[in-house]
Image (spheres, helix red, strand yellow):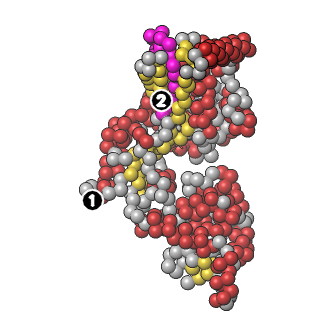
């Protein structure tokens, strides 16, 4: 059966059709698999063409992906509904049923979370607060409390950790659980339903879940289950479930990609998955292939256990052991700056800092603290210095210091910007842009940078050490000469 792609209505509808015609590669979907079909060409010409083009290679790769993805998996995705708003409603029931917006209070702040009642007016997260207030003048605007939200986030994680065989904390309010194989003992859906009920009962927070064959489909299912619902998408109905949905529902499609695809007339997942993958590859490179796979319900990314989730750390061993507190604190700040920049680059937040000290006798001590989710230097540096002050009680010579951020989740900076001005957000963004372009040390916090005098002192010390070493060498050489090279 030949398949001719019908486009969703839209300005670029014809564009897709003409692009498809240009590629002259139609897809034979009769077997449910993508096979390049080259019409009206002799067998020889078709063979020659297949040899010249890279289509068959990509197609073979895709076959392999489809095969790999057919291994049965059960992945559960859980996402708390209007998380920050729901927590606020726990402590103030008068907010129930009302339009509520959480975020920076000033006009130049941004929306972090908003209730469904506010969403009806077009308010959405990451929207400038001024715009949100204009859209929904009756909304109750609340300054957020990241410490409180972090606590609730950790309570939910705790409940999941106690019960789930393998789970990943993806963001402050989002978890994945790998339930593969559980069906043999207990129905996956039954288990998921009971877990959801338990979370609601224990925390009072509404949460939605999606159960399916991989992370992408489960996450999309959760989105469809909201608010306060649950959906299971079994393997056989993955494509019919995805087909009518907007491409915007695919997690990796952001605003920009969405606009590009929409301008080409691609609106539904059905249309996207029926575009030849090679064309998407040409258009968007590797991302194009990834997008096509997701649209086809293919995603082999594993659920990464929380304990295996990467941490970021750095250490410094002193050339000469030290007790110089000013220097140690300075160094800690610059170490925090270095790894906090890395954190923001990865669009992550940390909720645990560990400071490590190794004394000159190699005794090693660490101290850690759980904190509210953040990625800001100024917050992290203060806590790091505080931990160091608690840890460094022995006044012995220090050989090494280290800082580590762990318990990381995906998230953006604005999460704890409630108290800060938008200027501070812009400052961070500007600093990171400069660092990305000119290197990590291009901008540094004054407290993490040595003064001219300190730098001169350091250089003098290094010179002294070098002279000492040279003198020692000369002494040894003299002795050697005296004893005739014996
Ligand atoms: N968040 C934020 N800024 C964003 C997106 C989210 O500060 N741009 C915060 C506030 C949210 C929380 O992260 O409460 C979780 O994000 P979600 O995308 O899950 O949004 P909600 O939980 O608010 O709503 P939903 O019911 O759609 O999950
Ligand atoms: Mg949520």
Q: Residue at x 55, y 24 (%)?
A: 317
- Is residue 23 shown above or below 480? below
Residue 79, x across and y down, in percent: 46, 45
- Per the model, the C-alpha gap separating discs 2 and 1 is 37 Å
Pick whichever of labels 2 and 1 is earlier in the sequence: 1
Query: In which quadrant of the rendered view does residue 385 lie?
Result: top right
Asked if labels 1 and 2 touch by Cβ distance under 8 angstroms, the answer is: no
Q: Is residue 339 magenta?
A: no
**Magenta region, residue range:** 389-406
Q: Is residue 395 magenta?
A: yes
Classify residue 456 as left or right of residue 142: right
Q: Quadrant of the N terminus?
A: bottom right
Disc 2 element: strand
Do we see residue 96 in this rendering? no
Residue located farthest toward the front when viewing the structure as drawn: 484
Residue 2, x across and y down, in percent: 59, 82
**What is the crowding at mark 2: few (fewer than 14 residues within 10 Å), some, or many (at least 20)?**
some
Mark number, residue 352: 2
Mark number, residue 96: none
The mark total stands at 2
Residue underneath mark 1: 184
Classify residue 14 as left or right of residue 394: right
- Is residue 461 shown above or below 424? above
User: In front: 329, or 315?
Assistant: 315
- Is residue 185 shown above or below 442? below
Query: In which quadrant of the rendered view does residue 16 lie?
Result: bottom right
């Amino acid at each position: 059966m030949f398949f001719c792609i019908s486009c969703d209505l839209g300005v670029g509808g014809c564009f897709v059709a003409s692009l498809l015609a240009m590629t002259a590669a139609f897809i034979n979907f009769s077997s449910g698999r993508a096979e390049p079909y080259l019409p009206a060409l002799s067998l020889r010409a078709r063979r020659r063409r297949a040899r010249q083009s890279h289509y068959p290679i990509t197609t073979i790769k895709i076959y392999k992906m489809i095969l790999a993805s057919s291994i049965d998996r059960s992945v559960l995705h859980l996402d708390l509904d209007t998380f920050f708003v729901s927590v606020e409603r726990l402590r103030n029931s008068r907010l129930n049923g009302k339009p509520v917006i959480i975020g920076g209070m000033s006009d130049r702040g941004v929306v972090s979370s908003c209730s469904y009642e506010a969403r009806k007016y077009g308010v959405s997260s990451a929207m400038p607060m001024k715009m949100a207030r204009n859209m929904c003048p009756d909304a109750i605007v609340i300054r957020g409390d990241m410490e409180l939200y972090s606590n609730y986030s950790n309570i939910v994680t705790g409940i999941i950790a106690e019960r789930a065989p393998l789970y990943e904390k993806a963001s402050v309010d989002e978890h994945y659980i790998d339930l593969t194989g559980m069906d043999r003992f207990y129905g996956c859906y039954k288990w998921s339903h009971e877990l959801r009920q338990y979370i609601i009962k224990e925390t009072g927070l509404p949460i939605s879940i999606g159960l399916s064959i991989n992370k992408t489909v489960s996450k999309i299912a959760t989105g469809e289950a909201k608010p306060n619902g649950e959906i299971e998408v079994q393997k056989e109905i993955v494509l019919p479930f995805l087909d009518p949905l907007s491409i915007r529902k695919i997690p990796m499609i952001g605003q920009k990609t969405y606009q590009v695809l929409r301008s080409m007339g691609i609106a539904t997942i059905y249309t996207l998955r029926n575009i030849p993958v090679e064309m998407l590859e040409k258009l968007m490179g590797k991302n194009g292939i990834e997008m096509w796979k997701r649209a086809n319900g293919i995603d082999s990314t594993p659920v990464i256990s929380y304990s295996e989730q990467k941490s970021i750390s750095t250490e410094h061993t002193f050339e000469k052991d030290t007790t110089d507190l000013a220097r140690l604190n300075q160094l800690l700040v610059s170490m925090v700056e270095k790894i906090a920049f890395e954190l923001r680059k990865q669009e992550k937040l940390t909720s645990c800092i560990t400071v490590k000290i190794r004394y000159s006798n190699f005794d090693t001590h660490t101290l850690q603290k759980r904190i509210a989710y953040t990625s800001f230097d100024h917050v992290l540096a203060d806590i790091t210095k505080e931990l160091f002050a608690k840890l460094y009680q022995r006044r012995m010579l220090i050989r090494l210091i280290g800082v580590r951020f762990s318990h990381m989740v995906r998230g953006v900076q604005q999460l704890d910007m409630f108290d800060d001005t938008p200027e501070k957000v812009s400052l961070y963004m500007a600093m990171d842009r400069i660092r990305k372009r000119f290197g990590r040390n291009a901008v540094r916090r004054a407290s993490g940078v040595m003064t001219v005098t300190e730098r001169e002192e350091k250089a003098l010390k290094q010179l002294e050490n070098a002279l000492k070493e040279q003198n020692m060498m000369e002494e040894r050489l003299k002795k050697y000469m005296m004893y005739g090279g014996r």
